[in-house]
Image: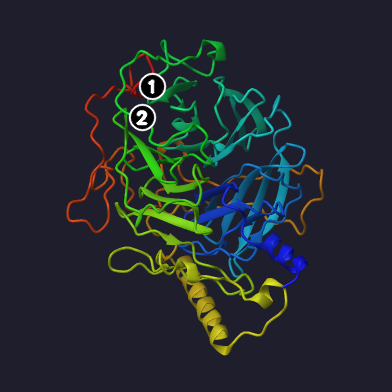
Amino acid sequence: MGALTLLALAATAIVPSEAAMAAWWTGIGPQVILQNETTGQIQYSICNSNGQPFYSYTGGSAFSLSYKPKIGTALAGTGYWDSTKTVASIFYTDTDNNIINGLFNCNMTTGLFQSVGSWIISGQAPSISTGTGLAALLLGSTAGYRVYFHDQDMAVNELAYTQATNWVYTGVISQDTQYSPAIHAAFSGTNNISVVTPRDAHDIEVTRWNSDNSWHITTLPRPLAGNLTTNGTAATAISLNNTAATNFSLTAWTGKPGGLGISIDQANTRFLWYIGNDSSLYSVANKNYVWSPQANQSNAFWPLADTPNAPLAVASDLKSSMVRIYYMVKGQIAEVKFENNVWQAWATVPAANNTDTSPIPSSTPDAGGSSSTPSADSSSSNTGLSTGAKAGVGVGVSLGVIALGLLGAGIFLFRRRQHRNGGDEYGTEGSVTLAGGAPTPSPSVPPYGTSPPPPHPASAGHDNYMWEKGNKGMPPLAAAGPNDGQIHQLDSANNPTELYVPRPVYEMPGQTISHELVGDGH
């Protein structure tokens, strides 16, 4: 094979393991995106899958973008199911260091996203760090979108979009200088948002929107010095309390992770996720205002990442407590899954043939609740497209493949018809069915430099701590799950519970000092 051919194949291959990733729960399944660091394209798992993501390992499907992504951009995204299709709203930085929002509707037959438009949303921001991280939330039809980024001082800032304001810069949420650009956000209500960032080589910072209309800043394991620290506290006035007693340290934490994640379960427990410098996955959780490390799972459930401090992406669903974590293992995307209150055996995200235009059938749970996905041992056999497909050459398909495609299309059309007739094929536990109001796709992508009106967020069904009435069987947000939110290992006679912390320090709801935790000294 010639050198030019090798270079061409390398340019279309999956991105290196250090590439940025993002993931979110659409209502019918997870959506995963990542950047190809060779071509700069932002690639995505097919958008018509139900419950199980599929990804092409020979180039992937790429978003059509009006603004060229910067190589090495941070990525963020959010989206929803509007009862007929999935919608994605992605965020990245372009070559001029603007923050860009692209809105896309899914063609549920082909599994490909169609562009609605792209917009510069950071025009009012005073400054943007060239190495900024990005996090995004869709709070609902009234509260709209939120995007979090770093300014030139590495302080964390917020952009907001509502139907009334369009995109506006709302200010700094933490003036504390961040150690590295990893950032993620989650919420359990429009007035209960948490944004997590690396504070230093020993600590994580959690910035939380409070009912007093200010951002409260805390750190773990070591607390901040002084009383209440908010977005109004100057950076020079923020320091750690190095004399406080501490209970634990962040294992294999360097303060420079490739990614940082947060998820919230139905008991309102917040979980933080990162990959350490030993390539292992780690988690810390806040229960009853106490932060503590969580029990590690074996490599059958939490595999080792390809690189230390590797990037990861976290998708979660509050009302079902489902969590899916994505990072690179053996050169492919691994899916780590917590579902039905147990950890499932990890699996490689299955390959998708992006020349097949039939819908991808949903994965079928077995009696134990796990999806029919490749095992860790068999994952390496997923090679995706053939050599001819890699080169872009049209290849005839067998009658068997055509038959499978027709069968998949029939299943998809049957399920969509059943849904329209009141069935609940897409109303599985954890789904968020949104009301109408999604924009009509534009006939073409706007040219570079244009700024059409911003996207119109549909109802996410969780304004003011409430979910849509149509979500039957939804437990109250304050109610604990079957295991009180505790994480258990699958297939174990003695399921390990979360680690006990002998000296808890509480983040009391009514006290003035807003410390979430203390940890051990260094």
Question: Residue at coordinates 37% horizontally, 26% vertically from top-left?
Answer: 221
Res. 219 image quadrant: top left
Where disc 2 sits, the SS reads loop
Residue that lies at the very extreme toward the bottom in this rendered image: 399
Question: Residue at coordinates 31% horizontally, 46% vertically from top-left?
Answer: 475
Where disc 1 sits, the SS reads loop
Q: Label 1, on which residue?
A: 522
Question: Residue at coordinates 58% horizontally, 54% vertically from top-left?
Answer: 87
Q: Label 2, on which residue?
A: 249
Q: Quadrant of the C terminus?
A: top left
In primary-sequence order, the first of circles 1 and 2 is 2
- Contact (CB < 8 A) between labels 1 and 2? yes
Across and down, in percent, residue 124 comes to: 72, 28
Question: Label 1, label 2: how many angstroms apart (C-alpha)?
Answer: 9 Å
Q: Nearer the viewer, residue 439 or 91?
A: 91
Number of dots carrying numbers: 2
